[in-house]
Image (spheres, grey):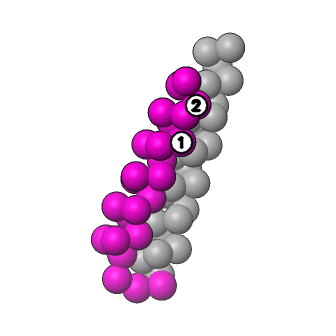
Amino acid sequence: MKVKTLLTTLAIASVVVFAGCNTIKGAGQDVSKAGDAVSDAAQNTQNRM
């Protein structure tokens, strides 16, 4: 259940991020930040196990 909630949250965040970027450079930065967030969430989940 927690994984589903995490994926839903990430999907919503991605939509917000992509809606806010105006340039290709901005999109690249947004994707990088999203990747960092996913990595952090995965690390936190692994640490809890």
For the point 52% across and 74% down, which residue is it? 28
Q: Where in the figure is residue 3, as x and y percent of width and height? A: 58, 31
Q: Is residue 18 above or below residue 24?
A: above
Q: Which residue is rendered at x = 47% and y = 52% of the image?
A: 11
Whether 42 is drawn above or below 49: the answer is below
* Distance from Cα at disc 2 to Cα at disc 1: 6 Å
Residue 44 visible in the picture: no
Q: In the picture, residue 46 is in which quadrant?
A: top right
Q: Tell me the kind of residue under disc 1.
A: Leu
- Which residue has dot 1 on it? 7
Horizontal and vertical percent for residue 15? 40, 62
Segment colored magenta: 1-24
Whether residues under marks 2 and 1 lie with C-beta atoms below 8 angstroms apart, the answer is yes
Residue labelled with disc 2 = 3
| Relative vertical location of residue 22 with respect to residue 29 in this rendering, above or below | below
Q: Residues within 10 Å of mark 1 (few under 14, many from 20)?
A: few
On whether residue 14 falls in the magenta region, the answer is yes
Q: Residue at x 48, y 84 (%)?
A: 24
